[in-house]
């Protein structure tokens, strides 16, 4: 069991049920999955860039990423349908809670000039998307092996029905949302 999952089960769930005035414990919002996505636009010219992104995502998440391919051809970008353009990882269960714990306690404090996360990054149904400009904020990445910085997005998918419920859940779990 992850320590964050234990905290959710023992403390956060009961507090959220009181705060949101929910009758059933199953109505309390919870984390469903975390999706880590990294697009590599330059992969159309240099396919080796995608290999390093896949390797880094596997190191960060502890799970092998799925390669994403282009759906349409775009001539001005020299892109054909079916070409690999990115990688994504979907985390669930204990791995998801362990990644979230590392994200909140280690990675977010290492972001340069960090003053808190924007509350406007919710999508309307309680899901939160966080964009990271470089992969060096993760301690698993070796600084000497990185040839160029690559951004990534981390989407926290919750079972919340509104942004307020999602924000309450993420704040209780330790996200520094303003």
Image: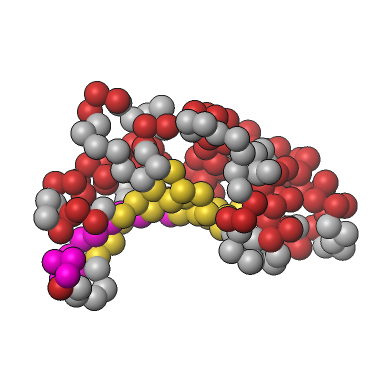
Seen at 35% across and 54% down, the residue is: 88
Residue 42 place in picture, x, y as percent? 19, 53
Quarter containing the N terminus:
top right
Count of all numbered marks drawn on residues in the image: 0
Seen at 24% across and 65% down, the residue is: 69
Left or right? Give the position of 50 relative to 18.
left
Q: Is residue 160 above or below residue 46?
A: below
Left or right? Give the position of 149 relative to 109.
left
Seen at 55% across and 34% down, the residue is: 114
Residue 24 place in picture, x, y as percent? 83, 62
Q: In this view, does 112 lie above or below 57?
A: above
Question: Is residue 27 at all visible to an observer of this figure?
Answer: yes
Q: Which of these two is toward me, 113 or 137?
A: 113
**Does the magenta run of residues contain 154?**
no
Question: Is residue 98 at all visible to an observer of this figure?
Answer: no
Q: Which of these two is toward me, 22 or 142?
A: 142
Q: Which residue lies furthest to the top in this view?
A: 144
Coloring basis for residues: secondary structure
Residue 7 figure quarter:
top right
Q: Which of these two is toward me, 1 or 177?
A: 177
Residue 139 place in picture, x, y as percent? 41, 27
Seen at 31% across and 43% down, the residue is: 150
Region in magenta? 76-92
Residue 157 figure quarter:
bottom right
Residue 124 figure quarter:
bottom right
Left or right? Give the position of 78 relative to 122.
left
Q: Is residue 75 above or below residue 147?
A: below
Quarter containing the C terminus:
top right
Residue 95 place in picture, x, y as percent? 49, 43
């Amino acid at each position: 069991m992850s320590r964050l999952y234990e905290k959710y089960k023992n403390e956060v769930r009961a507090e959220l049920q009181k705060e949101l005035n929910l009758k059933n414990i199953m109505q309390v919002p919870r984390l469903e999955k975390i999706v880590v996505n990294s697009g590599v636009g330059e992969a159309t010219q240099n396919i080796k860039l995608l290999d390093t992104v896949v390797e880094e995502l596997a190191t960060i998440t502890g799970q092998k990423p799925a390669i994403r391919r282009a759906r349409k051809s775009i001539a001005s970008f020299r892109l054909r349908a079916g070409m690999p353009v990115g990688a994504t990882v979907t985390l669930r269960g204990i791995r998801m809670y362990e990644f979230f714990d590392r994200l909140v306690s280690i990675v977010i404090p290492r972001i340069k000039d960090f003053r808190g996360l924007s509350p406007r990054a919710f999508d309307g149904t309680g899901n939160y998307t966080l964009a990271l400009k470089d992969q060096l904020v993760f301690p698993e990445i070796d600084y000497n092996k990185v040839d160029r910085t690559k951004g990534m997005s981390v989407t926290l998918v919750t079972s919340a029905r509104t942004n307020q419920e999602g924000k309450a859940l993420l704040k209780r779990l330790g996200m520094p949302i303003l």
